[in-house]
């Protein structure tokens, strides 16, 4: 491990915080009970841990515990939100609005719903990655079921105007789902005084374990379950609960909240210093620069070198992403950057650097750039 490159790909996943690992460990070993099998203390202890975790995560966004549903991650939560709403209401209201820069989990689910009768509007974004609120408002029709717009983009960190978007949706009687996977634990989020009806998140983006996440569903909203078999999670998502995962998600959430402000400014300072040094030297052009962004994200075009050769040349020094991780298996220019007006070459020549709270101090990486 001593020779491993510096990890700067925290938007694709994060290492487990050792304190999260420690909190989870008993639930693999002595407290291994099934949270739904409470005729004995094993199950009771598991059920108690789940209850406390659910309360903690609900409190984190100002929701009620019965509004929180555990899933295998954000992808499943997105599928449940969009398909669940469409299967319940889609025959009267088949129209969905989303944006061109959503995560593939939203875009691919929308494409599937189009195959079975949905009509989807994909809103464009401006050169900084923001949707136009007037265009959103005028896109809402009588038969619009829901709007799905992410809080923070997973390639650029660009933050949409969620409060305004929610207000527009509610003034028109349309459901509002937001993919909060990148924003959760990084910036304050709250559902009580906003018009967010559904919201998803994932533990492995916040120093928790992979394979656990959740969906907030505002009380009173009907969704059709996508996984049947026992009626767990208030009937919405069956399957034996991943107790260690849930405990890990709660611990990771708690730690992020405790340090949120301190982490925000520390990482923002590192990011801003990095960007301004390389911009002044004429080496990079930052994507989404004029929009509000998450503090630990930098997505930029390289001006003096191909992104691919930069990544190869520095493979042993830093681990960064070209485009988004989900696209890199396919090697396609990023759909997010193209929607922001970059051409294929500019998109392919862009790199995402994301700083995090665990690992080596990455302040000196700017000297690696030509
Ligand atoms: C990572 C990510 C997802 C998918 O989350 P998983 O828990 O890995 O399924 C969805 N949306 C965004 C914005 C993400 O960053």
Image (cartoon, grey):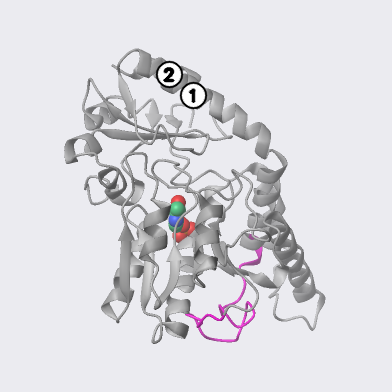
Residue 169 appearing in the image? yes
Q: Is residue 197 above or below residue 187?
A: below
Between the residue at mark 2 and the residue at mark 1, the CA separation in whole angstroms equals 6 Å
Q: Is residue 283 above or below residue 130?
A: above
The number of discs equals: 2
Let me know if residue 226 is in the magenta part.
yes
Whole-percent x and y of residue 170? 54, 67
- Which residue is denoted by mark 1 in the rendering? 272
Residue 361 appearing in the image? no
36 horizontally vs 269: left or right: right
Q: Give whichever of 252, 178 is nearer the camera.
A: 178
* Residue depicted at x 73% and y 58%: 59
* Residue depicted at x 33% and y 52%: 326
Does the CB distance between marks 2 and 1 fall below 8 Å? yes
The region drawn magenta spans 222-244
Q: Give whichever of 168, 107 is nearer the camera.
A: 168
Considering every residue shown, the one lying at the far top of the view is: 281
């Amino acid at each position: 491990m001593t020779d491993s490159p510096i990890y700067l790909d925290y938007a694709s996943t994060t290492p487990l915080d050792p304190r999260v690992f420690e909190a989870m460990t008993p639930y693999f070993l002595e407290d291994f009970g099934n949270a739904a099998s409470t005729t004995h203390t094993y199950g009771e202890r598991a059920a108690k841990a789940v209850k406390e975790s659910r309360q903690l995560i609900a409190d984190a966004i100002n929701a009620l515990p019965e509004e929180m549903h555990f899933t295998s991650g954000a992808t499943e939560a997105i599928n449940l939100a969009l398909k669940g709403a469409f299967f319940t209401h889609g025959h009267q209201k088949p129209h969905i609005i989303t944006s061109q820069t959503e995560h593939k989990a939203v875009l691919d689910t929308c494409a599937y719903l189009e195959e079975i009768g949905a009509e989807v509007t994909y809103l464009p974004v401006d050169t900084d990655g923001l949707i136009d609120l007037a265009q959103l408002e005028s896109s809402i029709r009588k038969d619009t079921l829901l709007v799905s717009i992410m809080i923070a983009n997973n390639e650029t960190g660009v933050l949409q105007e969620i409060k305004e978007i929610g207000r527009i949706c509610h003034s028109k009687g349309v459901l509002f789902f937001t993919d909060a996977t990148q924003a959760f634990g990084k910036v304050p989020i709250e559902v009580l005084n906003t018009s967010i009806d559904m919201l998803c998140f994932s533990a492995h983006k916040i120093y928790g374990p992979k394979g656990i996440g959740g969906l907030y569903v505002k009380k009173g909203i009907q969704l059709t379950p996508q996984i049947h078999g026992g009626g767990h999670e208030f009937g919405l998502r069956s399957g034996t609960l991943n107790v260690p995962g849930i405990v890990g998600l709660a611990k990771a959430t708690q730690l992020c909240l405790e340090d949120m402000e301190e982490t925000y400014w520390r990482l923002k300072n590192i990011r801003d210093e990095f960007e301004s040094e390389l911009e002044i030297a004429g080496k990079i052009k930052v994507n989404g620069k004029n929009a509000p962004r998450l503090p630990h994200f930098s997505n930029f075009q390289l001006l003096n070198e191909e992104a691919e050769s930069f990544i190869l040349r520095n493979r042993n020094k830093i681990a960064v992403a070209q485009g988004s991780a989900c696209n890199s298996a396919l090697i396609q220019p990023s759909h997010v950057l193209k929607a922001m007006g970059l051409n294929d070459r500019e998109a392919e020549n862009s790199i995402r650097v994301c700083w995090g709270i665990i690992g080596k101090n990455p302040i000196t990486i700017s000297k690696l750039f030509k």
